[in-house]
Image (cartoon, helix red, strand yellow):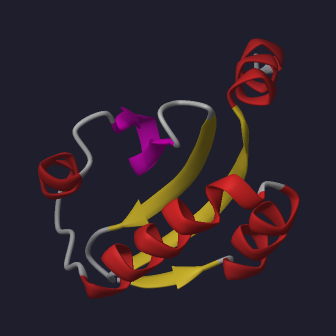
Amino acid sequence: MRIVGRDELDEFSRAHADARPWIANWIADAEAAQWQRPQDIKGSYASASFLPDNVVIFNVKGNRYRLEVQAAYKTGIVVVRWAGTHAEYTKRMSEKP
């Protein structure tokens, strides 16, 4: 997969040093992967959640943080939409209509 939005991951990793190894591993996994459907992701990331419009939520560092991406399975692209703490994610989701 090709990752779009690496700058978001770099910024997140600078702010949350304890998540750097997880993010680095996820980047390596995603770049090596050929995800063609949600089940392909679920095979490697059992705790991943799937939302409408091919949005995938990854639990980072035992659910301390969240990573939100949008997968374009047919084109092999993963777009990083957001990364932050679990509390920030909860607040963000409660503010959505």
Provide residue 19's location: percent of width, then percent of height.
63, 55
Where is residue 55? Give x, y as percent. 47, 46
Total tally of numbered discs in the picture? 0
Q: Position of residue 22 (x, y in %)?
A: 50, 60
- Classify 10 as above or below 82: below
**Picture residue at 76% right of the left edge, 12% below the top:** 94
Identify the residue at the far front of this view: 18
At 68% from the left edge and 76% from the top edge, which residue is drawn? 5
* Quadrant of the image occupied by residue 16: bottom right
Q: Position of residue 40 (x, y in %)?
A: 14, 58
Q: Is residue 50 magenta?
A: yes
Horizontal side of 72 relative to 19 (left or right) equals left
**Foreground residue, 30 or 55?**
30
74 vs 56: above or below: below
Instruction: Residue at 50% x, 57% y: name it.
Output: 70
| Quarter of the image that includes the C terminus | top right
Q: Does residue 70 sit above or below 8 in this rendering?
A: above
Residue ID at (17%, 68%): 36
Residue extent of the magenta highlight:
48-60
Query: As rendered, which of 29 and 14 lies closer to the eye?
Result: 14
Q: Is residue 96 left or right of residue 5?
A: right
Q: Is residue 42 magenta?
A: no
Main SS of the magenta part reads strand
Residue 43 versus residue 24: which sits nearer the camera? 24
Quarter of the figure with the N terminus: bottom left
Left/right placement of residue 9 relative to residue 50 reads right
| The one of 1 and 12 positioned closer to us in this rendering | 12
